[in-house]
Amino acid sequence: MKALVRRPSPRLNEGIVTYVERRPVDVELARAQWAAYVQVLEDAGWETVEAPPADESPDGVFVEDAVVVYGNVAVIARPGVEARRSETIGVEAAVAALGYAIERIEEPGTLDGGDVLKIRDTVYAGLSGRTNAEGVRQLREALAPHGAKLVEVPVQGVLHLKSAVTALPDGSILGFSPLVPEAFRGNFVAVPEESGAHVVLLRGGKVMLAADCPRTAELITARGYDPVVVDISEFQKLEGCVTCLSVRLRRATYA
């Protein structure tokens, strides 16, 4: 199992914010938090692969937005913010070197990887301020030959679909009630803290989540999983979450 990551840019403090008030980012602290995040992945048995640095891209550390991986195919995204599109170059080189078949989202499509939630063979694609209908159409076309069933999900009030919901190993959707898209309203596990809606599945029942949602960690424990907590406070200032900082490259049932 491999996980793709990218080091924070020295310009991280200039990262884009959309739905939150801008706050100063401590870049040195962010680097330390990133290193601790990578260590959590490695301690859980993941081999981390670094994408080439993108020092001129303040948001380049949010590597998830640059690519969607499903089975043996890697779909190179076309971010909704033009200034982020150069971030995909190094990511494409990294996944191609690992042997993935490459597909690309082309103009006029836009797609951020943070808008894509995979649960087994179902791929939920968020229609958001960053991902448009043409981007979702192209993603469906790229993944259909590999057995994926794509479901469009309108997203409002948050940056990405995975800013609102993720899922546990059994496929249960986690969401913070005020932000859950209508498509999941009838079937989700409500978490008590907004950041508790964001989890990364590790292995052996371990689930990574941010340090600022202790009640959600208790909920996850009660459901039979082992929460692994990581402090990503500096990235949260830029609307980042634990999912944004890596792309898990296993042949996964959920990512």
Image (spheres, rainbow, N blue to C red):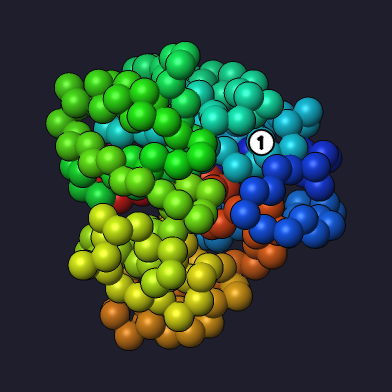
Tell whether 8 sits left or right of 220.
Answer: right
- 181 is higher (above) or lower (below) than 18: below
* Residue 216 image-quadrant placement: bottom left
* Residue at (47, 26) in percent of width and height: 110
Q: Tag 1, which secondary structure?
A: loop
How many numbered tags mark residues here?
1
Q: Which residue is mark 1?
A: 60
* Residue at (38, 67) in percent of width and height: 175
* Residue at (64, 48) in percent of width and height: 18
- 6 is higher (above) or lower (below) than 185: above
- 248 is higher (above) or lower (below) than 111: below
Q: In x, y percent, where is residue 138?
A: 32, 21
Q: In x, y percent, where is residue 212?
A: 60, 75
Which of the pair 152/254 is nearer the observer? 152
Q: Pick the quarter of the image with the N terminus.
A: top left
Q: Residues within 10 Å of mark 1 (few under 14, many from 20)?
A: many
Which of the pair 20/140 is nearer the observer? 20
Q: In x, y percent, where is residue 32?
A: 75, 57
Q: In x, y percent, where is residue 163?
A: 48, 55
Residue 48 appearing in the image: no
Which of the pair 152/90 is nearer the observer? 152
